[in-house]
């Protein structure tokens, strides 16, 4: 996916007094960091990011005008909020590395899939606030879906701050931690399901005679529009479906085929399977 260039703005940051360390500013950490700058949630001077490789740190620093290094300890030491953006298996080593910089006044936000708040608290070795989040890739365009859950030591203000962070890249919900693997199975990896549905609808358009680019645009915009209808009207999807299904019309014929093909059950099973896998990974 092409990267979107960001220019730091001149207007004051919306959260001026919080210093942020994004440790492991790769794909997802980088998306969040860009959104912070683009929406001016934090000013460039408030952010220190890290990467594993010095050359990627330098390239990122040059591109976005923020401090990017390979020194996690220094970044954590100078931060109030520490965002863990490394791969799940790298979390224990990273926490070991930054442990000397951790204090009870700081806060950790982790986006590492399947890593429990309790393990992060244990690895930190102190009663520190830990918020765990599961965002998804449409966050890159401000259309993400993220679920957050809190560890044992998170105050309402800290939770509010975590929510504001993820609201810069889309819609945010708060769930109990026991639901985080279900979130992974539904929205974490959900864009992949929707891409397949869009691809299949576009293929269908080609089958019934539409040029491929036209079919793809219509399929994607239809998925977007239907999602917007659900989110903005607040109506149950079944009600919206019934409203467009006229007696003896075309829609009911299409729906009949979908039901016969088992689309509904297949999607339910897909989410169940992915949730099970996320649970296996969480269990180690
Ligand atoms: N991508 C998604 O859709 C998605 C969705 C939800 C949650 N997540 C979670 O987000 C996390 C990152 O995933 P990703 O897809 O963004 O992976 P990624 O692009 O590989 O990013 C990981 C970054 O961590 C850096 N890194 C590795 N070891 C480091 C260390 N010791 N110190 C500092 N930086 C280090 C790497 O730096 P270099 O680039 O220099 O090697 C890389 O930029 C994972 O835990 C994943 O579960 C991802």
Image (tube, rainbow, N blue to C red):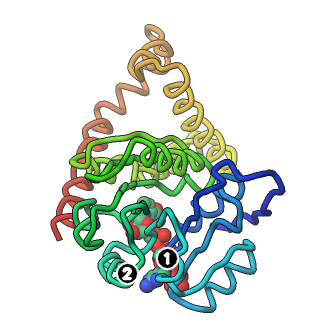
Identify the mark nearer the N-term, 1 or 2. Answer: 1
Question: Which mark, residue 100?
Answer: 2
Nearest to the observer: residue 255 or residue 264: 264
Secondary element at image label 2? helix
| x and y, in percent, of residue 210 in the image | 65, 42
Comparing 275 with 149, the one in front is 149
- Which dot marks residue 77? 1
- Give the residue at x 45% y 54%: 135
Res 125 → quadrant:
bottom left
The dot on residue 188 is none
Q: Is residue 219 above or below residue 282?
A: above
Q: Residue at x 65, y 50 (%)?
A: 212
Q: Residues within 10 Å of mark 2 (few under 14, many from 20)?
A: few
Instruction: Tell me if mark 1 has few (under 14), some (14-19) or many (20+) residues whose alpha carbon lies within 10 angstroms of its own.
Output: some
Q: Say which residue appears at 72% left-offset and 56% top-offset.
A: 38
Q: Is residue 72 above or below residue 284?
A: below
Determine the residue located farthest toward the bottom in the rendered image: 54
Q: Do the CB atoms of the residues marked 1 and 2 lie less than 8 Å apart? A: yes
Count of marks, rendered view: 2
Camera-side residue of 111 and 156: 156
Residue 228 x, y percent position in the rendering: 56, 30
Expressed as whole percent of the image width and height from the top left, the position of residue 196 reads 45, 52
Q: Which residue sits at x=66%, y=54%? A: 16
Q: CA distance from mark 1 to mark 2?
A: 8 Å
């Amino acid at each position: 996916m092409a990267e979107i260039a960001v220019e730091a703005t001149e207007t004051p940051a919306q959260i001026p007094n919080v210093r942020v360390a994004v440790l492991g500013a790769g794909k997802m950490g980088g998306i969040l960091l860009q959104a912070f700058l683009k929406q001016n949630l934090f000013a460039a001077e408030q952010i220190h990011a890290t990467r594993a490789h010095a050359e990627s740190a330098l390239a990122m620093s040059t591109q976005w005008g923020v401090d990017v290094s390979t020194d996690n300890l220094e970044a954590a030491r100078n931060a109030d909020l520490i965002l863990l953006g490394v791969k799940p298996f790298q979390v224990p080593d990273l926490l070991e590395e930054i442990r000397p910089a951790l204090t009870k006044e700081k806060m950790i936000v982790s986006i590492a899939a399947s890593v429990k708040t309790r393990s992060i608290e244990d690895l930190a070795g102190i009663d520190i606030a830990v918020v765990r989040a599961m965002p998804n890739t449409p966050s890159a365009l401000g259309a993400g879906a993220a679920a957050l859950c809190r560890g044992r030591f998170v105050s309402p203000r800290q939770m509010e701050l975590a929510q504001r962070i993820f609201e810069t890249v889309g819609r945010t919900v708060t769930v109990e931690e026991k639901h985080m693997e279900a979130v992974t199975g539904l929205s974490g990896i959900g864009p992949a399901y929707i891409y397949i549905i869009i691809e299949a609808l576009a293929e269908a358009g080609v089958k019934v005679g539409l040029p491929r680019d036209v079919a793809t645009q219509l399929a994607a915009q239809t998925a977007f529009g239907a999602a917007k209808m659900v989110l903005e009207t607040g109506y149950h999807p079944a009600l919206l479906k019934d409203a467009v299904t006229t007696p003896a019309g075309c829609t009911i014929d299409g729906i009949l085929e979908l039901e016969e093909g088992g689309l509904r059950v297949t999607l339910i099973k897909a989410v169940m399977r992915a949730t099970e896998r996320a649970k296996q990974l969480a269990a180690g």
